[in-house]
Image: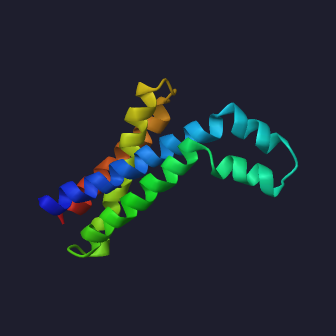
């Protein structure tokens, strides 16, 4: 059970990374930099955004945590849990005002059903 909690932590860190990266890429300074011709200065403006940096750090931490999962479980058992990230992303997305269609919600439900079946095997 402890490995399952660690896997969920890794998934949660990845979801948090996605939302941090989205916040960074939605920042007006980043959008202005992306509207300009590509240059080293503009690339640095994007990469140096605090939310982009935070997103990368969260991904890195999630990867380190994931190593703990892989040290204990087969990849074929562990990797389907990444699918739970879809469900968590939809939940967090709803909390921040994103629109989720019934079709998208149904797709996420199918992913969760698949994760459940793999976990029981």
Please say whether residue 7 is visible from this viewpoint: yes
Where residue 36 sits in the image (x, y, percent)? 86, 43
The residue lying toward the viewer, choosing from 9 and 104, is 9
Image position of 108 (left or right of 116): right
Measuring 24% from the left and 54% from the top, which residue is drawn there? 116
In which quadrant of the rendered view does residue 26 lie? top right
Please say whether residue 84 is visible from this viewpoint: no
Where residue 87 sits in the image (x, y, percent)? 37, 42
Where residue 89 sits in the image (x, y, percent)? 42, 41
As drawn, 83 above or below 90: below
Measuring 41% from the left and 26% from the top, which residue is drawn there? 95
What is the quadrant of the N terminus in the image? bottom left
As drawn, 50 above or below 76: above
Where residue 80 sits in the image (x, y, percent)? 33, 61
Residue placed furthest toward the left: 1
Q: Which colour scheme is used?
A: rainbow
The residue lying toward the viewer, choosing from 121 and 48, is 48
The residue lying toward the viewer, choosing from 91 and 40, is 40
As drawn, 115 above or below 88: below
Measuring 49% from the left and 46% from the top, which residue is drawn there? 18
In which quadrant of the rendered view does residue 114 lie? bottom left
Measuring 84% from the left and 55% from the top, which residue is drawn there? 39
Image position of 99 (left or right of 14): right
What is the quadrant of the C terminus in the image? bottom left
């Amino acid at each position: 059970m402890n490995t399952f909690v660690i896997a969920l932590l890794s998934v949660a860190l990845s979801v948090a990374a996605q939302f941090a990266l989205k916040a960074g890429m939605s920042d007006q300074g980043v959008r202005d930099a992306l509207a300009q011709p590509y240059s080293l200065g503009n690339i640095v403006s994007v990469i140096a955004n605090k939310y982009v940096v935070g997103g990368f750090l969260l991904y890195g931490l999630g990867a380190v945590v994931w190593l703990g999962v892989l040290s204990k479980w087969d990849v074929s058992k562990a990797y389907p849990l990444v699918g739970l990230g879809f469900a968590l992303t939809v939940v967090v997305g709803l909390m921040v005002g994103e629109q989720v269609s019934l079709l998208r919600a149904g797709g996420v439900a199918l992913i969760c059903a698949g994760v459940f079946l793999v976990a029981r095997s």
